[in-house]
Image: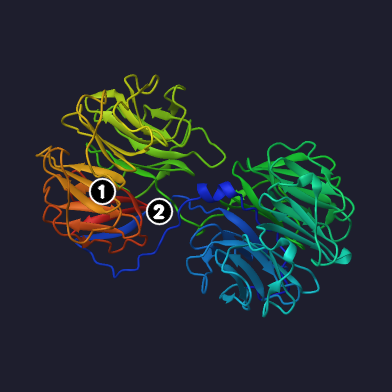
């Protein structure tokens, strides 16, 4: 891909410890032979924006449109030759690996080094294919890479310290015994002063003035988490980004002082502009870009991208071209920062957290995700448009986790967010408003009482069940009889007997028959219960999707037995019954796609023909049973029942 001159040494990554817990689980490609099982799937919703947390960028020197982007995602590496107008995975030799660092070779334009989930990789063809460099490296994540003009490659690892290669990656050796059990998150080199700076995870900042032979810990930053470091090879200046501020050295790392006058929010990354080392760019966890024109003495806001920024790369010869890697993908400017565009076509995935269909008008569908809020289709999924007006945008996006539609036809919708409670739309999703401020929490599921559109129950993340009778203005906890040590992870209301609700937990099932005034344990201990489906004619016939497959109850949940060949020990995340033929069931799973049963769940066959990803988060069925819709780890799929 890189077939011109040597590429720029791009700005590196920041990998926050908290990021690992927040990032989306990567999509997994199906490994089994596709079988229709009576359902043929097609991906719909190409209008939806894909996303991936981009933590590393590398730019080709003489072509500002040629870029590599490393992501905490699967796939983990993407390439563009169009300035980000479109991206393609570039993962031959990198299958199922996240990418944390990219380092072009200082002497050969086609050689690129890459830090990944399990170690160090090298490409000799500009990133088209990759080979692992094992040698003496441990099987551990590589978070940081740095190379000087002399060709020495430094490799920062997770919990195994710093390694170095002096022969283009052919051999790698431990650089220092002093850092042997340290997690290295960031590296910077100033070869003219033989200086290396290493930022660590919770052990502060280390500086070496003899190319890594010996190290001194910076006392002002002892115990700090250092996400990024930068040194100016043309001066004695450098910067280190810690959780409690930005620090600067003006004597090649011998002393450090705070340098965040005018900055707002935690700085994740800072880079020197290649045209002028007095000009610096800084990106924050709140998604703001700042610029300094006096070497870091003062800062002013340059742009607001609204998403956490992890890496910045300025093109060395086309200096008006700047790329930013952020929580939700890549942003770029071609006019020196006057305007910015998100450049995500083909990069990452479209994780769908929730999906609902209007049972009275099945042309209407809504899909929610944490990045973009709510998408709506008015033509059965043929086309989609964002409907996020009024939703509060946070650092990680709009944070939609759940949706619910009352049975009435007055265009009322409820949306559960990732920390701001319930939002309500009275116009079919055109506009949204907070239901109230009494419950500012993550809402994982919403159950609307049939015939009482203002009467709702919710499950709260890391908590249990709450009830509101005024559309979310006020709330009452409803967990009498529930363990205070368990989180509720699913909530289902019996549409014909609304005083009965089923709450699945991390360890078994709870049932109420008095409108959640009290709950009783209902078996399935030792497994997580992700969903419940109720037979449309026999309301005591229940199916539960668990971490051990499907379970069935014939007595309203008093007793359960494992049910069905083909799904045992597979996590079932979604269940629906055909409304016209309840002997036909469909199951969405974690990592195994979709299944179908035509005998009431006794036997299950794969039904994933055309389903390109394996994790199904939500599953809904057309009221006539002719179509299925699946919300997955990468977009919405429509299944035609054969």
550 vs 87, nearest the viewer? 550
| Disc number placed over residue 545 in the picture, else none | 1
Q: Residue at x 69, y 63 (%)?
A: 180
Q: Position of residue 212 (x, y in %)?
A: 79, 66
Q: Residue 2, relative to residue 604: is it above or below?
A: below
Name the colouring of the figure.
rainbow
Q: Earlier in the sequence, mark 1 or mark 2?
A: 1
Q: Position of residue 297 (x, y in %)?
A: 85, 42
Q: Which residue is mark 2?
A: 633
Q: Residue at x 76, y 60 (%)?
A: 188
Question: Judging from the image, what secondary structure is the residue with disc 1 in?
Answer: strand
1 vs 2, front mark: 1
Q: Position of residue 215 (x, y in %)?
A: 80, 60
287 vs 519, nearest the viewer? 519
Q: Residue 4, relative to residue 279: is it above or below?
A: below
Res 504 quadrant in image: top left
Q: If the image is split into quadrants, where does the N terminus sit?
A: bottom right
- For the question of whether residue 327 can be seen, the reply is no
Q: How many marks?
A: 2
Whether residue 317 sits left or right of residue 65 in the image: it is right
Whether residue 170 sits left or right of residue 252 in the image: it is left
């Amino acid at each position: 891909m890189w077939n011109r001159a040597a590429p720029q040494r791009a700005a590196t990554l920041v990998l926050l410890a908290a990021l690992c817990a927040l990032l989306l689980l990567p999509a997994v490609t199906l490994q089994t032979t596709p079988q229709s099982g009576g359902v043929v799937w097609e991906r719909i919703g190409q209008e939806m924006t894909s996303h991936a947390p981009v933590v590393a960028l590398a730019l080709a020197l003489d072509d500002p449109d040629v870029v590599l982007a490393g992501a905490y995602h699967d796939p983990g590496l993407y390439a563009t030759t169009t300035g980000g107008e479109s991206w393609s995975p570039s993962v031959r030799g990198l299958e199922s690996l996240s990418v944390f660092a990219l380092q072009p070779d200082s002497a050969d334009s086609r050689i690129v080094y890459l830090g990944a989930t399990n170690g160090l990789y090298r490409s000799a063809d500009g990133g088209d294919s990759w080979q692992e460099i094992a040698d003496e490296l441990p099987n551990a994540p590589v978070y940081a890479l740095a190379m000087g003009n002399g060709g020495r490659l430094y490799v920062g690892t997770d919990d195994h310290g710093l390694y170095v290669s002096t022969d283009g990656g052919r051999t790698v050796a431990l650089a220092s015994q002093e850092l042997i059990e340290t997690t290295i998150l960031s590296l910077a080199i100033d070869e003219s002063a033989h200086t290396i700076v290493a930022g660590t995870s919770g052990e502060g900042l280390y500086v070496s003035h003899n190319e890594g032979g010996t190290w001194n810990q910076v006392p002002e930053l002892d115990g700090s988490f250092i996400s990024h470091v930068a040194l100016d090879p043309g001066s004695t200046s450098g910067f280190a980004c810690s959780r409690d501020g930005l620090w600067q050295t003006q004597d090649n790392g011998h002393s450090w002082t705070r340098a965040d006058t005018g900055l707002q929010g935690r700085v994740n990354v800072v880079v020197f502009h290649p045209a002028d080392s007095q000009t610096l760019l800084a990106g924050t966890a709140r998604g703001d870009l700042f610029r300094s024109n006096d070497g870091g003495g003062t800062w002013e806001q340059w742009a607001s991208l609204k998403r956490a920024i992890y890496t910045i790369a300025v093109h060395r010869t086309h200096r008006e071209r700047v790329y930013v890697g952020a929580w939700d993908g890549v942003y770029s400017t071609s006019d020196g920062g006057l305007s910015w565009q998100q450049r995500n076509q083909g990069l990452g995935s479209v994780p769908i957290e929730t999906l609902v269909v209007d049972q009275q008008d099945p042309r209407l569908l809504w899909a929610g995700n944490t990045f973009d809020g709510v998408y709506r289709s008015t033509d059965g999924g043929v086309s989609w448009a964002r409907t996020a007006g009024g939703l509060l945008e946070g650092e990680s996006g709009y944070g939609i986790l759940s949706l619910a539609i009352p049975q009435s036809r007055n265009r009322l919708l409820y949306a559960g967010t990732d920390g701001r409670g319930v939002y309500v739309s009275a116009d079919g999703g055109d506009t949204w408003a907070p239901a109230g401020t009494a419950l500012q929490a993550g809402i994982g599921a919403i159950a609307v009482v049939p015939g009482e559109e203002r009467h709702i129950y919710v499950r709260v993340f890391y908590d249990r069940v709450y009830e509101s009778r005024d559309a979310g203005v006020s709330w009452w906890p409803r967990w009498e009889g529930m363990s205070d040590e368990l989180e509720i992870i699913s909530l289902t209301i019996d549409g014909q007997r609304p005083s009965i609700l089923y709450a699945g937990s991390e360890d078994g099932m709870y049932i109420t028959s008095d409108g959640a005034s009290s709950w009783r344990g209902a078996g399935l201990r030792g497994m997580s219960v992700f969903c419940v489906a109720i037979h449309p004619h026999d309301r005591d016939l229940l199916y539960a999707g668990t971490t051990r497959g499907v379970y069935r109850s014939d007595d309203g949940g008093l007793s359960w037995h494992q049910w069905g060949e083909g799904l045992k020990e597979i996590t079932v995340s979604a269940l629906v019954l055909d409304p016209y033929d309840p002997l036909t069931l469909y199951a969405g799973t974690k990592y195994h796609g979709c299944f179908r049963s035509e005998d009431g769940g006794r036997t299950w066959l794969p039904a994933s023909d055309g389903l390109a990803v394996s994790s199904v988060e939500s599953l809904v069925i057309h009221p006539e049973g002719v179509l299925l819709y699946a919300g997955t780890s990468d977009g919405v799929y429509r299944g035609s029942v054969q």
